[in-house]
Image: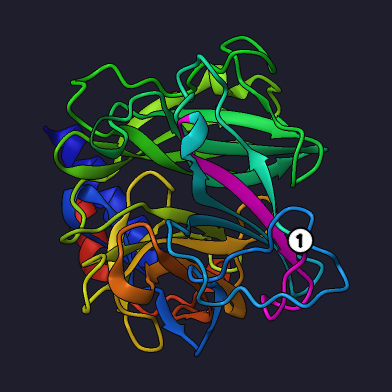
Amino acid sequence: MLKERSNILLYLVLATIAGYSLGGAGQVLASTPLVVNAHPGIRIHDSSYKPPPDGWPSWLPWNGEGKNKGPSYRYGPALIRHGGNQLHFWACSQGDPDINIADYIRYKHSSNGGVSWGAENIALAPTPGSLDSWAVCDPSVIKIGGWYYMAYTGTKNSTAGGFTNHVFVARSTRPDSGYQKWNGSGWGGTPSPAVRYTGSADNWGFGEPSMVVKDGVIYFYFTVDEGTPRTRVATAPANNPNWPGALVHHGYAISERDWAEDQTDVKYLPQVGRFIGVGIANRFTSSSYLHVWESLDGLHFYPVDTVAANLQPTAHNAGLSGDASGHAEMGNREYVSYSYTGPGGDWGRWDAFLNRISIGGPPYAPLNIPVKNDITPILQLLLM
């Protein structure tokens, strides 16, 4: 007991010196939490647009706005900001019912912060006869060395729109195509889950991954949905080319989300030494909002802010931009993208939006925080 008391008091001293205080469940909470604001944004996917038919002459004008009547969506996006204001963009998108595919992951690129986009293509498709044969969705992408690693949700079970999900990983030397899937011992061939769901077939299971690389460690987040959606975290060494087989699980990073809150997309903020997570709560409703979380260790998160101004209502499944390691910047550099209900309110017809965001709150020099707190009372307790 005396040893435990001494450890707790020492923890308090260190936290006080660093400018932090204790929060729930023994977490260390930042004395100045992160604050996020969204700027006015732009629509980057029009669900009513129908592409020209195959063989349409390039010289003949085509206006497909308002012509699509079927499913069309780009949700759960992954965004990598690079080269200043360029954006890689991957998202879950409608599949091909004629061959029993529910979802593809599509890719496109912008050279001007999302104002305009280049050609779009299918970056990842289901593998016939495998555990991801019906749908691939919810991408998260990081780059280690010359490899883009894409974590994603996949399933072969079409029950109720896709129960019994697992988390998979694929990799490629280019962002838009050529991905080889983790097979349990290496890359290519029949995919094997990096995180396999073994629970009831009546649940969604595991999915909605998010990845960050920090100090040579991959932080691997994913949703556990067995009736109550929560966020779990695992880690693996980034220098191991077969790291999906070396994940070590650390339990729940977020054990209780807000009402109807979906996937947690996580980035690291090196300027302040904190992790930031975002998710959409009250999803699909007129009062949807961006829920902001933060963490000092990447393993335990707590809520710090909500954002609704300038975001579209009926939003769901957001992605936060960062660099190829999953590092975001303070200030006005980053973006958040998400889907929201499109024309007619039909299920599966969702537009996508992009807002530039501001991340502020703490000073940008976490290692030089002045000691403002009087620690004398705590030192006196240590000497008792």
Q: Is residue 117 magenta?
A: yes
Tell me where the magenta segment starts and ends, as one range: 100-118
Task: Please provide percent x and percent y for residue 95.
Answer: 51, 43
Q: What scheme was used to colour the molecule?
A: rainbow
Question: In the image, 251: left or right of 217?
Answer: left
Between 49 and 217, the one lying in front of the other is: 49
Q: Relative to 160, say whether 241 is above or below.
A: above
Q: Tell me the quarter of the picture where residue 165 sits.
A: top left
Task: Please provide percent x and percent y for residue 73.
Answer: 47, 59
Question: In the image, 51: left or right of 164?
Answer: right
**Residue lying farthest to the right in this orientation:** 59
Q: Is residue 81 magenta?
A: no
- Local packing at callout 1 (Cα closer than 10 Å; few below 14, some 14-19, many 20+) is few
Between 147 and 115, the one lying in front of the other is: 115
Residue pictured at 50% horizontal, 68% vertical: 337
Q: How many marks?
A: 1
**What residue sits right under mark 1 in the picture?**
119
Residue pictured at 14% horizontal, 35% vertical: 2
